[in-house]
Amino acid sequence: MADIAFTCPHCTQHLEAPPEMAGDQLSCPTCKKELKIPTVMPVKLTGQPTPMGGKIVAGLVGGFILAMLAANVASVVFGDPTAKEQSTAVTAVSGLVFFGLWAGSIYLSINADRAAKAWRKLLITSACLSFSLPLAGMLMAGKAAYHYETKGRHLESAAMAGAGGIATIALGILGFFLGAIFLTIGLLVGRDNKKPG
């Protein structure tokens, strides 16, 4: 490790000391006054920390996108596709997923060393959720068809299966495009540009 370079606060003489002497007191060889050898601060190789404002924005906006996707997937997975209005339990689960993920995203973003890394994690996770939208659509269609089939309503079952297929295709297209956008942006931001040394 390189020596600590510093100046005397009294006479501005340039001095050097080995790292193991950091924090020790000594007399300046030029002015003979007492001074303290500064401690060495660790240097981060991944770049400078981002100001707190950038991290908060990443948590609020990126976390909101992630929480909205997760809440929608949860409502499709746990909801009743034949009901006109979802039950209180399904609404509560979706709300808990939304607020829990949003708060967690804000917390993780604030504790990230850079806002770009927080954005990267949030966008890649949002891409994964977007790609799961067609699976949620297939599950919803299957549940609806099963509901009508068990009630002996074969015509409604076939109609729900057809409508579910259309919904799955629509969710697949939407999920693919959203996922591709989030994944592309997520892979481009927050990378460590380390040069080979």
Image (spheres, rainbow, N blue to C red):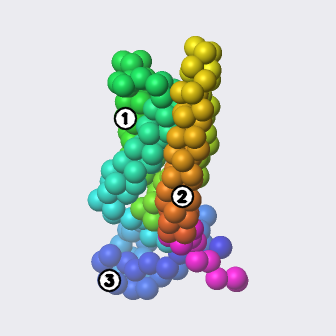
Residue 114 horizontal side relative to residue 52, left or right:
right
Is the residue under label 2 in contact with that under label 1 (CB below 8 Å)?
no
Q: What element carries label 3?
A: loop
Quadrant, the N terminus: bottom right
Q: Which of marks 1 and 3 is nearer the N terminus?
A: 3
User: For the stretch drawn in magenta, what is the main secondary structure?
Assistant: loop
Give the magenta part as a residue range: 187-197
Name the residue that disc number 2 marks. 173
Q: Is residue 114 at all visible to an observer of this figure? A: no
Residue 77 horizontal side relative to residue 97, left or right:
right
Q: What's the amino acid at mark 3? A: Cys
At 54% from the left and 33% from the top, the residue drawn is: 160
From the image, state whether disc 3 or disc 2 is nearer to you: 2
Q: What element carries label 2?
A: helix
Crowd band around label 1 with a 10 angstrom C-alpha radius: few (<14), some (14–19), many (20+): some
Q: Which of marks 3 and 2 is nearer the N terminus?
A: 3
Crowd band around label 3 with a 10 angstrom C-alpha radius: few (<14), some (14–19), many (20+): few
At 61% from the left and 24% from the top, the residue drawn is: 154
Q: Which of marks 1 and 2 is nearer the N terminus?
A: 1
Residue 116 percent coordinates (x, y): 45, 65
Residue 78 percent coordinates (x, y): 51, 26
Q: Does the magenta stretch include residue 93?
A: no
Q: Distance between the residues labelled 3 and 2?
A: 71 Å
Crowd band around label 2 with a 10 angstrom C-alpha radius: few (<14), some (14–19), many (20+): some
Name the residue that disc number 3 marks. 11
Name the residue that disc number 1 marks. 99
Residue 94 falls in which quadrant of the image? top left
Closer to us: 109 or 111: 109
Q: How far apart are marks 1 and 2 (CA)?
A: 27 Å
* Vertical order, 152 against 174 (above or below): above
At 57% from the left and 19% from the top, the residue drawn is: 153
From the image, state whether disc 1 or disc 2 is nearer to you: 2
